[in-house]
Image (tube, grey):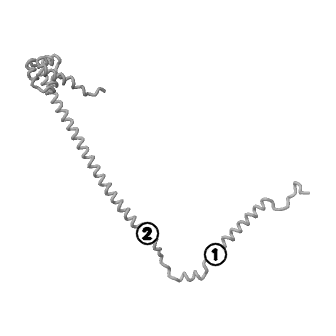
Amino acid sequence: MSGGPGKPRAGLGALGVVALLFIGSAAARLGLEAGQAWANEPPDDAIETSAGAEPDTCTTPEDIGTAIELLREREEQIQADEARIADRAQALAVADREIATRLAELEAAEADLRDLLALAEEAAEGDLSRLTSVYEAMKPKDAAALFEAMEPEFAAGFLGRMRPDAAAGIMTGLSPETAYMISVVLAGRNARAPTE
């Protein structure tokens, strides 16, 4: 009959087995690592002979030396390229400043020219207005004689600016051919203007 509730069991139990396995694993590892350390240790006579000998100079294999030389050449080339790029960037910066200066000068000249053109246009408009007033103030028969001698486009420009009653008086005094040509010019002036 197996032991009752108060009696301890015989044997190690699960905990004891696990503990033994851990201990065995540690001993095995220790033994393996110690064996490798002894295998890697040079013999005593090798240590003594190397201590008295002259140290060897470090030599690089030929292919590594060639690779190092190629890398040095490439580094020098990159540095030269970087210097050229820096010079070019500086030249571009100078050119940008010069362009900005010239652009400012051009914008100022354009503004001056615009003002001058506006002034000239205003003066020309004033001259045209005065001349139109003069033609309106003339007797229609005298003005018609002048308009008969003008080119139809030129005459139409003045007639288009006049009061309708003054323009009608001048048109009445013109020859039918001249009156017709001026009428065609007046009617077609805005035919080419956009409708939208």
Q: Residue at x 61, y 81 (%)?
A: 44
Judged from the image, the secondary structure of the residue bearing numbered disc 1 is helix
Q: Position of residue 125 (x, y in %)?
A: 17, 28
Number of the front mark, 2 or 1: 2
Q: Give the residue at the far right of this rendering.
A: 1
Q: Amino acid at mark 2?
A: Ile
Q: Which residue is mark 2?
A: 68
Residue 90 in the image, given as x and y percentages of width and height:
31, 55
Circle 1: residue type: Ala
Helix, strand or loop at disc 2? helix
Depth order, front residue of 4/83: 83
Q: Are marks 2 and 1 in contact (CB under 8 Å)?
A: no
Left-right relation of 86 to 184: right
Task: Name the mark on residue 39.
Answer: 1
Figure check: 59 above or below 105: below
Identity of the residue drawn at 28% across and 51% down = 95
The residue nearer to you, when weighing 171 against 61, is 171
Quarter of the image with the C terminus is: top left
Where residue 10 sits in the image (x, y, percent)?
Answer: 85, 61
Viewed as shown, does residue 33 lie left or right of 114? right
Disc on res. 27: none
* Image height of 148 relative to 80, above or below: above
Q: Position of residue 156 (x, y in %)?
A: 16, 24
Q: Earlier in the sequence, mark 2 or mark 1?
A: 1
Quadrant for residue 137, please give it: top left
Residue 80: quadrant of the picture: bottom left
Q: Nearer the viewer, residue 38 or 131?
A: 131
